[in-house]
Structures are given as C-alpha cells and as structure tokens.
Image: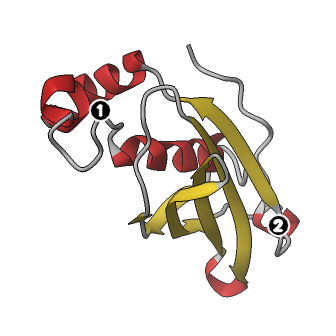
Amino acid sequence: MLAAASRSKYFEELEIGQEASTSRVVSEADIVAYAELSGDFNPVHLDAEYAATTLFKERIAHGILSAGYISAIFGMTLPGPGAIYVSQTLNFKGPVKIGDRVETVVRLSELVADKKRAKFDCVCSVNGKPVLTGEAVLMVPSRPK
C-alpha cells in the first residue's frame, strides 16, 4: 500500500534546521520481504540458529532497510516528491532487531543555491541510541515560474 505524499517543498521554501521524522517497528515480515526484494539472504538476517553464533546473538535487520526509512522521508515528506538523491553516506553504529522501533530523523544542514541542492544530516535510532548516521545530498526542484 502506498502512503499519501505531502506536497513537495520547492528549493525556495527550504530553511536550514528544517526536520522531518518517521517511526517504524521492524517486523519479521519486513526482513523477509527485504531479503526477497534485494536477493540478500545472509543468514544473520534469516536464520535464528546461525545468528545465535554471531556477536549479535539473534537475527538482525538488513542495515539498508533502515536506510530506506531515510529515503522514504525524502521522497514523501521533506523535500517530498520530485527530490532526487545525489549522494548518501551511511555509518552503521549498531544492530536493529525484530521488534525494534526505528526512529528516523533528517535535518537540513546546508543549501547550495546555485545547484539547487540540499544537504541533510540523517540519524536512525533505537531506544535513543543511533544505529545509523549519515549525510545526504538531494537536488530539489525550484518553484515553477
């Protein structure tokens, strides 16, 4: 099911410090669906017996699943539809386990007017502890003339 998008923000409407966030509980179904879609069947994500032998001691979600929550904010909320990813750095700080609530926040940190680009700081947290940090650069459409 597709969520309704908010109205896209034009480059001229953006201001340093603007934030958007989302919250999502990671389910067994999310992990299995991501494995199916991506082809990443690493047993640390899908095999409880195998995962018990790792430093995590239980199954963990694909790190890129959390990164997808960042992408969803950009595509649906801030800036919204029409924004185009230019780059994204990702620093994985900790695991996300089945049942964890991932809180995702993006904050506008820089505007590059001549290129219509916006730079965002990105953080995904579980229980207040960052599990993923990074920086994204997006191209943002200008207001039509």
Q: Residues within 10 Å of mark 1 (few under 14, many from 20)?
A: many
Which residue sits at x=23%, y=23%? 36
| Residue 14 tag number | 2
In the image shown, does 109 or 128 lie closer to the viewer? 128
Which residue sits at x=80%, y=40%? 7
| Residue 59 tag number | 1
| Mark 2 vs 1, N-terminal side | 2
User: Mark 2 or mark 1, which is nearer to you?
Assistant: 1
Please name the amino acid that badge 1 sits on. Answer: Arg
Please name the amino acid that badge 2 sits on. Answer: Leu
In the image shown, does 140 or 75 lie closer to the viewer? 75
The quadrant holding residue 47 is top left
* Residue 144 visible in the shown view: no
* Residue 116 visible in the shown view: yes
Q: Is residue 108 left or right of residue 122?
A: right
Q: Quadrant of the N terminus?
A: top right
Q: Position of residue 35 (x, y in %)?
A: 24, 28
